[in-house]
Amino acid sequence: MSSRICITGASGYLGRALCRKLAGRSELLALVRQGGAARVAKGVRAVELDVFDTGQLVAALAAGDTVVHLIGTSHPNPSKAAEFERVDLASVRACVKAAAGAGVAHFIYVSVSQPAPVMHAYVAARQEGERAIAAASLTATILRPWYVLGPGHRWPYLMLPLYGVASLLPGTRDTARRLGLVTLAQMTRALARAITEPPPAGTCRVLEVPEIRAA
């Protein structure tokens, strides 16, 4: 049985950060689109393939792998609804099908906090991704951040005073916690911990913003 960590979307914002955190592990493998290997963190072995092709993904995976699925539309906003269907949802459906076919041990998926008052198309695509995981009966961990702060992703810092007020009011406290901001470091720590501490076989656990921060 394999003990590899296979990361799709390893050349992206969160994928590169996770690869840097996990770099040095001989079992780490980045699965990226054609031309994406050059953007993977140094020292991480990369395989280029069609990430929407279930057959190619099955060939790249092995029984016992941990798969971390991080493919998604960069800088999501309401104008990118078509991309959420074409990229985010299509990729997770292909990867879930491949993971089930290959017999992977653990599937890790970054979804989004829900319900939410905005970004309805994005939330809907991620909800469909979660349903695909459930339908495949995979052992899985689903993380639900709202916005991940980091280099090039800092503008929501301007909203921190509003979050502070909302967290004090009984009517908005729960929403403020669920839709709270997490840092890139918190996300990579939560993902790394999910990798090393999988849930019981056959179960799916969900980590909301408070659990991501606690990791």
Image (spheres, helix red, strand yellow):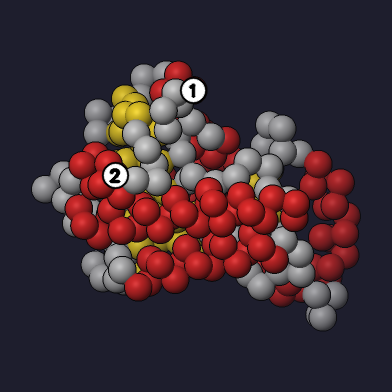
How many numbered callouts? 2
- Residue in view at x 57 percent, y 35 percent: 13
Q: Position of residue 138 (x, y in %)?
A: 30, 65
- Say which quarter of the image contains residue 59: top left
What is the number of the mark on residue 141?
none
- Of badges 2 and 1, the one in the foreground is 2
Left or right for 178, reference 59? right
Left or right for 115, reference 211? right
**Circle 2 crowding by C-alpha within 10 Å: few under 14, some 14–19, many from 20:** many
Q: What amino acid is found at the position of numbered circle 2 in the picture?
A: Leu
What is the number of the mark on residue 57?
2
Q: Residue furthest bottom?
A: 171
Q: Secondary structure at mark 1?
A: helix
What is the number of the mark on residue 39?
1
In space, the residues marked 2 and 1 are separated at their CA atoms by 20 Å
- Say which quarter of the image contains residue 211: bottom right
Q: Position of residue 109 (x, y in %)?
A: 44, 55
Left or right for 31, reference 26? right
- Residue in view at x 60 percent, y 67 percent: 124
- Residue in view at x 82 percent, y 60 percent: 163
Q: Position of residue 155 (x, y in %)?
A: 81, 41
